[in-house]
């Protein structure tokens, strides 16, 4: 009996030793693989060519903040990346090709608010855009004022009762910081928040420090130009649907074109991105809003975002937001793909909740960074009841013009529709040229 116990114990010890050995070997192999992967990336892209965002260049802006009472407009994207490591390949218009995909290596990040507090910068209050300070609210959802549980700072919502900071809220502010990741689309509301923050700062003689970040759709300009009569929070200025500027460049344009009320000008200082050009591929390490989870969704967003002005679901209520579209009234004989939206993070009440939607899955496409009408035209042409497609007022607000819906409904081709934009696009490009920071 004692021999059997000894025998079983020895066998157990042997098995544990083998298991531990295998685990150590696995971990060792994983570490070597990680090192190999890191080294391989470094061979392809040198660190001195890495894109460095404005927030990481603390040496340039900390002197502007010392001894000041600071306000900050921020959300979950307002971070400083540890070691400033951004490793990206050369321009790649077809990022879905794994052999050419831009690599991003970020060891860690720390929120700008936490970093500045740790550097003894006197942050008085935080202002948050659509989706809130932590980026968890639904699109269009009103966000209330609150208090940050981590820092105890008061947070004032700019997507609730007020879209513009009030004079009372700015009473004890010497300088304001704006640091939010944009995606370069007119109806993405962060540039509207920028407008109102600039206007409030100008009216209260508060300088604005802008920490610039790359525009992932900054390599092109396209889409209909907004008509002034259709201005709203989804588009305040006469710019194309895809505007081709960073936040810093756009701020310069707002000032230069006298778009603020009464032509007031905001005193701005821009901390520019390093090693960035408009042709650079930039992979966002943090989703800029709940329903833009990855590079593909951000690339498709300019085109699929138009579905927000229709009765067609664009992937909200699934894990493939802005990577598919569908509706119960699209032709199920034409479309082989279907899905059912349900409430999830970023979409408490998705369009056509719990109903089978027929349409198109784009989650595996090799999307190029460009704008197209083919998706919305496809959906309209294959709707069983065409009168149900457009939510006309909302679609006009997104498109910036009444004309686009009429053109689609009349059966015009995409090339014919595009031809009607060209004069306005060329005029905008000339204006944009005056405010560019990057090639």
Image: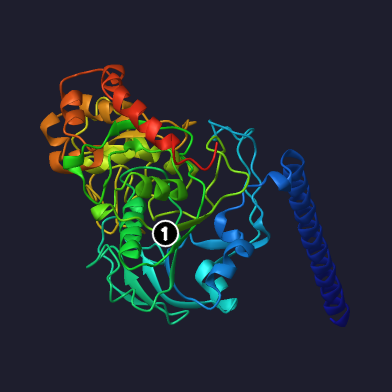
- Label 1's element? loop
- State the count of labels: 1
Q: Quadrant of residue 70?
A: bottom left
Which residue: 43% across, 43% down?
Answer: 298
Percent coordinates x, y for residue 412 in the rendering? 22, 18
Above or below, 387 against 341 in this view is above
**Render colour scheme:** rainbow
Above or below, 151 against 217 in this view is below
Return the residue at label 1: 267
Foreground residue among 20 and 187: 187
Badge 1 density bin: few <14, some 14–19, many ≥20, Cα 10 Å? some
Observer able to see residue 385:
no
Percent coordinates x, y for residue 7 in the rendering? 86, 73
Q: Quadrant of residue 281?
A: top right
Q: Which quarter of the rendering shows the N terminus?
A: bottom right
Foreground residue among 411 and 1: 411
User: Seen in the image, is 173 located left or right of residue 280?
Assistant: left
Observer able to see residue 404:
yes
Q: Which quarter of the rendering shows the C terminus?
A: top right
User: Seen in the image, is 196 located left or right of residue 54?
Assistant: left
Which residue: 31% across, 48% down?
Answer: 258
Above or below, 187 against 8 in this view is above
Percent coordinates x, y for residue 372 in the rendering? 35, 28
Percent coordinates x, y for residue 379 in the rendering? 25, 30
Q: Residue furthest left?
A: 387
Q: Quadrant of residue 338?
A: top left
């Amino acid at each position: 009996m004692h021999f059997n116990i000894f025998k079983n114990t020895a066998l157990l010890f042997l098995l544990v030793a083998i298991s531990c050995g295998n685990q150590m070997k696995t971990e060792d192999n994983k570490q070597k693989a990680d090192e190999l992967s890191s080294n391989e990336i470094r061979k392809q892209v040198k660190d001195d060519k890495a894109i460095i965002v404005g927030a990481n260049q603390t040496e340039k802006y900390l002197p502007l903040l010392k001894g000041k009472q600071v306000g900050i407009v921020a959300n979950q994207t307002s971070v400083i990346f540890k070691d400033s490591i951004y490793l990206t390949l050369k321009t790649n218009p077809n990022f879905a090709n794994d052999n050419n995909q831009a690599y991003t290596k970020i060891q860690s990040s720390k929120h700008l608010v936490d970093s500045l507090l740790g550097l003894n910068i006197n942050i008085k209050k935080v202002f948050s855009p659509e989706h809130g300070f932590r980026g968890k609210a639904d699109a269009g959802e009103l966000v209330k004022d609150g208090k940050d549980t981590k820092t105890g700072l008061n947070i004032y919502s700019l997507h609730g009762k007020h879209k513009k900071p009030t004079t009372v809220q700015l009473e004890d502010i010497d300088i304001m910081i704006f640091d939010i990741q944009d995606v370069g689309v007119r109806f993405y509301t962060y540039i509207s928040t920028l407008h109102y923050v600039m206007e409030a700062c100008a009216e209260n003689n508060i300088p604005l420090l802008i920490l610039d970040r790359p525009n992932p759709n900054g390599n092109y300009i396209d889409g209909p130009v907004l008509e002034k009569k259709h201005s709203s929070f989804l588009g305040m200025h006469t710019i194309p649907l895809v505007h081709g500027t960073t936040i810093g460049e756009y701020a310069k344009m707002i000032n230069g074109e006298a778009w603020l009320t009464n032509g007031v000008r905001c005193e701005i200082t821009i901390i520019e991105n390093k090693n960035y050009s408009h042709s650079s591929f930039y992979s966002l390490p943090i989703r800029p809003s709940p329903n833009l989870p990855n590079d593909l969704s951000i690339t498709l967003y300019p085109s699929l975002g138009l579905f927000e002005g229709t009765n067609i679901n664009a992937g909200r209520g699934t894990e493939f937001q802005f990577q598919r579209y569908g509706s119960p009234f699209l032709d199920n004989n034409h479309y082989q793909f279907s899905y059912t939206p349900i409430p999830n993070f970023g979409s408490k009440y998705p369009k056509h909740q719990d109903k089978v939607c027929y349409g198109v899955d784009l989650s595996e496409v090799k999307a190029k960074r460009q704008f197209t009408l083919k998706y919305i035209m496809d959906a309209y042409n294959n709707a069983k009841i065409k009168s149900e497609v457009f939510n006309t007022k909302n679609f006009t607000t997104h498109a910036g013009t009444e004309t686009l819906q009429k053109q689609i409904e009349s059966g015009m081709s995409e090339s014919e529709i595009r031809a009607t934009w060209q004069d306005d696009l060329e005029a905008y490009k000339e204006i944009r040229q005056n405010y560019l920071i990057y090639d």
